[in-house]
RNA sequence: GCCCAGAUGGUGGAAUUGGUAGACACGAGGGACUUAAAAUCCCUUGGCCAGUGAUGGCCGUACGGGUUCGAUUCCCGUUCCGGGCACCA
């Protein structure tokens, strides 16, 4: 019987669908296992062979766990909101929903061909109201929450034992009613800026004023901050969406702009996001990337008074030990202090500088890092030395980090050093023996000196001289705290996430505006559905695309969406025109899969308690500082609310490597239509041109297909070598423009899904980036044919019930051991060779025993499910192979026949003779010592020592 | 600049936690079958040297050292490639 993969695969796809083989239900009697892929954005280009890599890897694991008896959740869905569909809509007028739907259908068709064990009954799409209901709901919950280290009701003594958590905003309001902000800092309440008011002042505020104040504390808040504005995309972007100063999508320039936007107080969770990394099983490099992104730094905030003024300001430093080396101060240009501290004489110079800074884009700042700055005219008094230091303004200080102001210590900070050299400011070294004539000494090592300097009358009774830097940092912090000069502070690089996008194709905010203040659409009215618009571009007045919607106003009487024309700001109010960013919908989708059709909650308590969190998450590492931070934040928030029972959403994470394209080239002789083969190209002046890899086979060009490929090549002529045209090749990103995209459909059509699955796994470690090379696929296909042929003699099914021989059982159990270990370790690329070896061995043994072949079918089922099903059925089973039991490895079948003796002498190691395997170590050692069994070339030499090494080898060292 | 991960044949990659480096596959070469092709099967395939031959010897896991009877594996230094962060005070 021939291995007819086309029929087999078609048959089982139909049967799996009809039997709902992969549908799962919560089952208290079985242990759960949750496998998840990062859900795809359905792009118009469809899948290429790189996409399914992670899906195949996780599918193998899911099927394996299922065969081990676990109740496996393996869902799939679509991250359906996104820029490409909207850009396409702008160009063509086609509604993004239609484009997205079409793309999803195409994705589904392609995915189905590969034979995944997804439970499609749990499919989610982020753009469907039933789904984004819960995205909107979570946003509202964040609006209605604030964050603190301890409950505001807790007393002084139990504060430290309380947990940091999101809490209802009512708790904060009650506190303000009673205390104002008095004592608030001791609860560690997260805030945008530090506010001070009394209970009387609070109670005297108007409702709007109070709402304004609460924005300072809400986890989802409307904040006026510097944002990354991308004019070409017409929207703001989050930090992780900006790469090298240009937008991640499209590569358009990004400028800094002060705008009022919805933000999420991700920074409140910075410490928990950092701590949580210790509890999860991710790669070290990914954790490191997140640690860098969170960027914790411990330091001190120290207050500096302004000379001849009652003003003062605070700086942040991690080098409190360098207080005696401060020679000037620097403010960020965007700092509010600039206005306050600029003197009349310097006003015009400062204005000029601010204008210069404003017109520079992020990209300019990165590419052209020159030293710029301007003197403000004011001086600050160093609280340690009493010296007056000039206050400068420079773009090298960032407004968004620390306090937007620094103390400059040019001797020990390279940036301050460059600035001091450029503007001729003094440099005072503080470390014994350091040379600061050419560059600053930034290392945190050495012995402190000049603190205070000799001959300078110390302003305060304090000296750091003779201490190590570390000791000096600690001593200074302690002193600063005791004397009330400042406080110990931890800063994080992680910023709050900008949550508004000036776009159409995203979740609408369930928010309307009354007197300019945002109000939440009542929870029971969710979801607030995305309205229809005529145009997907911004309005003429520059409003976001939702400004084009005719029906986009909120009637508080009927609690419904009504025509804009009815807006009276009495009972009908304008709705929010921004939409949510891409990461909104992807931040909690793993929870929705647990209970996708629940109309009452994001996830029901029972479903959440059963599935808990994702055991194995597979996806690309490009989400390290985006999705994987946001969804950890989102989940922690839901954990605080009691919605999610686990603080970390993804226990183990595997990053699949990108599959790169392998491009092919033809070489055209300049100014001709003649193409020369690779080996002869150096004899001519040639231009390499990309050629479609689909008309090249084994680097040999199909000449007819090439002529037909493009009209201009119809008359092409060729200079061949050995009668063939050989193409050059290179590894590049897989992309349409390089003509190196390989479509999985074509592979499936030609070789079958099982071959594709096997080959993708065989290509190399899942985590590693590797080039796709279709040439090697024959090997995987040949293997499946061999595997199939073990079961058949001509057209009869050859499996017998005879007792297997020890050699056959050994081959089988070697395989069970290897495959089980390799799946657990995610190293499928080494499991597949084991199958090939076992198949060859058993074929040579002419093994047709059911006791051997049946477990083989189960072993291969995760990798090649279609062929496994077909053989399983042929073996007489009425249930699918998915209900089989994973074979159990038994050591007793693996006994080696012999034990080797290794002999080391004269600096070389040699293998000696074999002992019977059942000889025990002592016998072998005694025999070796007695010289009875040593080979003849060791005659007369003396045994120095005998070492027993793993694998039961005996190592004898001779002299 | 800082942090992380790497470097093995013509190619993708193996090597159980220090124990016969190059599994397995591709490619290449040779052969069998065939009118021919496809398919299938068999042999060779890291380099150098010796031998008619079975075979034997030397070198070899980016480079230079070290530890060890023994190092792709552990340690120190260097080079190169990839990834992350980067005026974050």
Image (spheres, grey):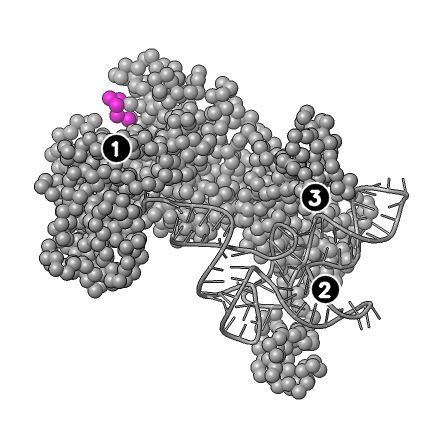
Q: Quadrant of residue B22?
A: bottom right
Q: Which residue is mark 3?
A: A679
| Residues flagged by tags 3 and 1 on a common chain | yes
**Mark 3 or mark 1: which is in front?**
3
Q: Which residue is mark 1?
A: A354
Tell me residue A147's x, y (percent).
28, 41
Residue shown at 39% from the left, 15% from the top: A550
Residue A757 image label: none
Tell me residue A895's x, y (percent).
66, 68
Foreground residue among A926 and A9: A926
Is A276 drawn above or below residue A957 in the view shown?
Answer: above
Q: Does residue A516 show up magenta in the picture? A: yes
Tell me residue A107's x, y (percent).
57, 32
Indicate the secondary structure of the residue bearing disc 1: helix
Residue shown at 67% from the left, 82% from the top: A938
Dot 1, how many residues are within 10 Å of its Cα: few (below 14), some (14-19), or many (20+)?
Answer: some
Q: Quadrant of the C terminus of chain A?
A: bottom right
Dot 3, how many residues are within 10 Å of its Cα: few (below 14), some (14-19), or many (20+)?
Answer: few
- Relative to A121, B46 lies left or right: right
Asked if residue A401 shows in the view, the reply is yes
Indicate the secondary structure of the residue bearing disc 2: helix
| Residues flagged by tags 1 and 2 on a common chain | yes
Residue shown at 75% from the left, 51% from the top: A790
**Mark 1 or mark 3, which is nearer the start of the sequence?**
1
Dot 2, how many residues are within 10 Å of its Cα: few (below 14), some (14-19), or many (20+)?
Answer: few
Chain letter of the residue beneath label 2 in the structure image: A
Q: CA distance from mark 1 to mark 2?
A: 84 Å
Identify the magenta region.
A514-518
Residue A806 image label: 2
Indicate the secondary structure of the residue bearing disc 3: helix
């Amino acid at each position: 019987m021939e291995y007819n993969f086309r029929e087999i695969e078609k048959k089982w796809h139909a049967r799996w669908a009809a039997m709902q083989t992969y549908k799962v239900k919560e089952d208290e009697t079985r242990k759960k296992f949750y496998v998840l892929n990062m859900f795809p954005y359905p792009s118009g280009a469809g899948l290429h062979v790189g996409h399914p890599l992670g899906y195949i890897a996780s599918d193998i694991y899911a099927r394996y766990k299922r065969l081990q008896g676990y109740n496996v959740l393996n869902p799939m869905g679509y991250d359906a909101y996104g820029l490409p569909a909207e850009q396409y809509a702008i160009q063509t007028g086609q509604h993004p929903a239609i484009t997205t739907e079409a793309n999803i259908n195409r994705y589904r068709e392609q995915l189905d061909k590969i034979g995944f064990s997804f439970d499609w009954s749990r499919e989610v799409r982020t753009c469907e109201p039933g789904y984004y209901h819960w995205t909107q709901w979570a946003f509202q919950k964040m609006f209605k929450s604030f964050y603190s280290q301890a409950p505001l009701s807790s007393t002084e003594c139990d504060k430290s034992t309380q947990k940091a958590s999101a809490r209802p905003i009512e708790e904060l309001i009650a506190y303000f009613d009673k205390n104002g902000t008095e004592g608030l800092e001791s609860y560690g309440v997260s805030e945008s800026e530090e506010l001070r008011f009394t209970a009387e002042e609070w109670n005297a505020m108007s409702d709007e004023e109070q709402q304004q104040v609460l924005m300072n504390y809400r986890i989802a808040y409307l904040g006026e901050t510097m944002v990354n504005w991308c004019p070409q995309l017409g929207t703001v972007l989050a930090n992780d969406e900006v790469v090298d100063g240009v937008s991640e999508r499209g590569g358009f320039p990004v400028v800094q702009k002060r705008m009022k936007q919805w933000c999420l107080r991700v920074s409140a969770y910075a410490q928990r996001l950092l701590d949580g990394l210790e509890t999860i099983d991710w790669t070290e490099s990914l954790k490191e990337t997140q640690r860098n992104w969170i960027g914790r730094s411990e330091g001190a905030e120290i207050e500096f008074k302004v000379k001849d003024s009652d003003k003062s300001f605070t700086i942040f430093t991690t080098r409190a030990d360098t207080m005696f080396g401060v020679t000037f101060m620097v403010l960020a240009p965007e700092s509010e202090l600039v206005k306050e501290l600029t003197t009349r004489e310097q006003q015009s110079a400062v204005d000029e500088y601010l204008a210069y800074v404003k017109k520079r884009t992020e990209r300019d700042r990165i590419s052209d890092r020159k030293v710029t700055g301007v003197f403000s005219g004011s001086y600050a008094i160093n609280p340690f030395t009493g010296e007056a230091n000039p206050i400068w303004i420079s773009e090298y200080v960032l407004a968004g980090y620390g306090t937007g102001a620094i103390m400059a210590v040019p001797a020990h900070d390279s940036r301050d050093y460059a600035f001091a050299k450029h503007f001729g400011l003094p440099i005072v070294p503080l470390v014994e023996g350091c040379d600061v004539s050419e560059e600053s000494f930034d290392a945190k090592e050495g012995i402190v000196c000049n603190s205070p300097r000799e001959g300078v009358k110390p302003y305060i009774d304090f000296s750091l001289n003779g201490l190590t830097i570390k000791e000096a940092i600690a001593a200074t912090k302690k002193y600063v705290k005791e004397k009330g000069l400042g406080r110990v502070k931890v800063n994080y690089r992680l910023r709050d996430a900008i949550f508004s996008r000036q776009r159409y194709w995203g979740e609408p905010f369930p928010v309307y505006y009354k007197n300019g203040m945002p109000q939440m659409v009542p929870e029971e009215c969710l979801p607030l559905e995305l309205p229809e618009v005529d145009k997907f571009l911004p309005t003429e007045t520059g409003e976001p695309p939702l400004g084009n919607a005719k029906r986009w106003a909120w009637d508080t009487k009927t609690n419904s969406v009504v025509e804009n024309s009815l807006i009276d700001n009495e009972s009908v109010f304008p709705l929010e025109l921004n939409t949510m960013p891409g990461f909104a919908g992807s931040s909690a989708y793993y929870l929705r899969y647990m209970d996708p059709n629940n109309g009452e909650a994001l996830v029901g308590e029972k479903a959440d308690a059963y599935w808990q969190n994702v055991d194995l998450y597979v996806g690309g590492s490009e989400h390290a500082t985006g999705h994987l931070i946001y969804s950890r934040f989102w989940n922690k928030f839901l954990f605080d609310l009691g919605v999610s029972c686990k603080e970390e959403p993804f226990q183990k994470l595997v990053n699949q490597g990108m599959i790169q394209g392998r491009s092919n080239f033809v070489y055209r002789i300049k100014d001709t239509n003649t193409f020369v083969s690779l080996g002869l190209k150096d004899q001519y002046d040639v231009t390499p041109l990309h050629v479609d890899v689909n008309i090249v086979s084994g680097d040999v060009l199909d000449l007819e297909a090439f002529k037909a490929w493009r009209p201009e090549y119809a008359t092409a002529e060729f200079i061949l070598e050995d009668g063939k045209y050989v193409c050059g090749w290179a590894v590049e990103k897989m992309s349409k423009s390089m003509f190196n995209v390989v479509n999985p459909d074509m592979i499936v059509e030609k070789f079958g899904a099982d071959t594709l699955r096997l080959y993708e796994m065989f290509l190399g470690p899942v985590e590693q980036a590797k080039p796709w090379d279709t040439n090697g696929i024959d090997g995987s296909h040949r293997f499946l044919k061999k595997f199939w042929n073990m079961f058949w003699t001509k057209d009869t099914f050859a499996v017998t019930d005879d007792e297997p021989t020890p050699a056959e059982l050994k081959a089988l159990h070697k395989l069970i051991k290897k495959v089980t270990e390799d799946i657990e370790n995610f190293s499928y690329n080494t499991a597949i060779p084991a199958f090939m070896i076992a198949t060859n061995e058993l074929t040579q043994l002419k093994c047709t025993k059911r006791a051997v072949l049946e477990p083989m079918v189960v072993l291969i089922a995760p990798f090649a499910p279609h062929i496994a099903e077909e053989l399983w059925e042929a073996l007489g089973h009425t249930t699918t192979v998915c209900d089989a039991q994973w074979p159990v490895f038994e050591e007793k079948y693996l006994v080696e026949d012999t034990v080797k003796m290794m002999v080391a002498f004269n600096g070389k190691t040699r293998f000696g003779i074999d002992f019977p395997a059942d000889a025990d170590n002592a016998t072998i050692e005694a025999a070796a010592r007695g010289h009875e069994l040593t080979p003849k070339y060791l005659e007369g030499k003396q045994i120095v020592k005998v070492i027993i090494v793993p694998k039961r080898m005996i190592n004898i060292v001779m002299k």
